[in-house]
Amino acid sequence: MRNAVAAMLAVAMLITSALIALEIAVLMRTPIQIGAPNAAGATVADHEPLLRAFYDAANALLAGERSTLLATVISPEIQTHDGSNATARGEDGLRDYLAGLGQRGDISFHVVQVIGDDAEIAVVVETRQTPSRRWRGVDLFRLEAGVIADYWPSSLNTPLPFSLPSITVPAPDAAMGVSLTRLELAPAAEPVSLAVPVPHLLLVETGAINVSREHALQIARAGESRFAFMAADPAAEHLLLRPGDAILVPEAASPRVWNAGTSSASALSLIVDSRARLFGQLRAGPSSLVTMEIMHDGWRVGRKTAWDGGAVTETLAVKHLPVGQYPKGIEITSNQIALDPGQRSSPLPPGALRLAIVRAGVVGVSVINSDAVPISVPNPDSQLAAAANHLFWAGDAFWIEASEAPHLANAGAAPLDILLIDVVPLKEEGEGAPTSYATEPLDT
């Protein structure tokens, strides 16, 4: 009996010593090597425990837990290459990336296979959102001194699980149009003023963006079904927006936005304005600095422009609205279309002008005849995956006319995610409801 107690005490001391060593290592920022020696001829078996520990730490952070495991498996100078123009550096940059991913919903990682025998490793990882919603990607790592020095995540391309709440905007003019622009901000970019004479919608795509509080605005966090009013409070902390968050800026306001993270950030900017302003040739102020007026210049469609101060803009789509069809204003509703490889949507019901924004994957469109892409296919069941000029990629936007009822098909090998915005005449409160779009297997 005495020997058994002594053995148990010895085991307890060993466990306690290990935990103390772990905490000391975290505090001293000295990573502990977990089965990934920095030696020639290392095998998958040597690397796998380290990489599995990395995903365990990522899952803990995505679940909202406070975990110190991450610091033990990464270099203090780790670089996260998330596909943006700027690389996130250090543990804070990696945590910012994971925090942005966590805004997309209840996501977790599961290692399928580790491939590689040297310092450069590929990991096949399955990302799970619901029991039926899961997809696979390949993450890349570079190891140095037994820890992770570089990380190239594939998870950046996972579908976003949200749509925008419905909004209404008054008609600014009898002859008006809709403009959609993408705004990209580098970490050191100067603040951009959102001053515009009409209501303005801003939807964060990637990264983290700060918004000043000098003016009242409305905000909807990712997944929320309606906008909430937020009063002006210049003394308050800046409002932090993550992917999926949206703000609606009233016409009299001019808040400033700037990058709040260590990697680049991007947002979609949408306004409904008079045609005269959207296509005006005379612009006030210096032409080298980005303004809302310049961002939504109708002559810049398809052109990506870098401005003084570090901002980059691209006008994605501008559309003239028929005169007389929107006398009271516009109601904007949206839906998400998420298609796995081999799926297509049922025909979209005609009757509403739609703006499609491809957020991930590649989409094939069966019938389309719009200002942005003047093409038409008479057969609504044609397979668009074989027609290159009917394919749209992540980051693209295109119009679907009110008379068209196309199929949208996943034409790639990764999940497809589209934000579909309906632009319809303003209804009385309580009339109508957003339309949902079913999916069906793609005939092959």
Image (cartoon, grey):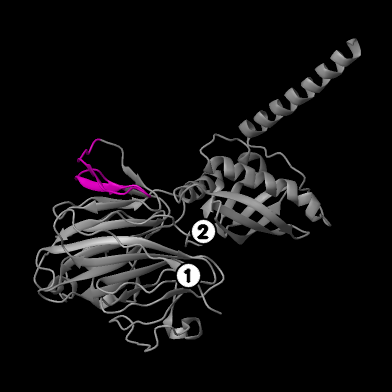
Q: Quadrant of residue 358?
A: bottom left
**What element does badge 1 sit on?**
strand
Q: Count up the numbered dots.
A: 2
x%, y% of residue 89?
A: 54, 50
x%, y% of residue 67?
A: 58, 35
Residue visible at 34% across and 83% down? 373
Magenta segment main secondary structure: loop
Three-letter amino acid code of the residue under disc 2: Leu
Magenta extent: 211-235
**Viewer-side label of 1, 2:** 1
Q: Is residue 136 above or below residue 99?
A: below
x%, y% of residue 138?
A: 63, 61
Pointer 1 residue = 440
Circle 2 packing at 10 Å, graded few (<14), some (14-19), many (20+), is some
Three-letter amino acid code of the residue under disc 1: Glu
Question: Can residue 126 be seen?
Answer: yes
Q: 179 or 357, which is in the foreground?
A: 357
**What element does badge 2 sit on?**
helix
Q: Is residue 81 above or below residue 282?
A: above
Marking on residue 156:
2
In this image, 300 relative to 266: left or right?
left
The alpha-carbon separation of the residues under discs 1 and 2 comes to: 26 Å
Q: Quadrant of residue 341?
A: bottom right
Magenta span contains residue 216: yes
Magenta span contains residue 420: no
Q: Quadrant of residue 3?
A: top right
x%, y% of residue 357?
A: 37, 68
In this image, 115 relative to 311: left or right?
right
In this image, 178 relative to 365: left or right?
left
Q: Quadrant of the C terminus?
A: bottom right
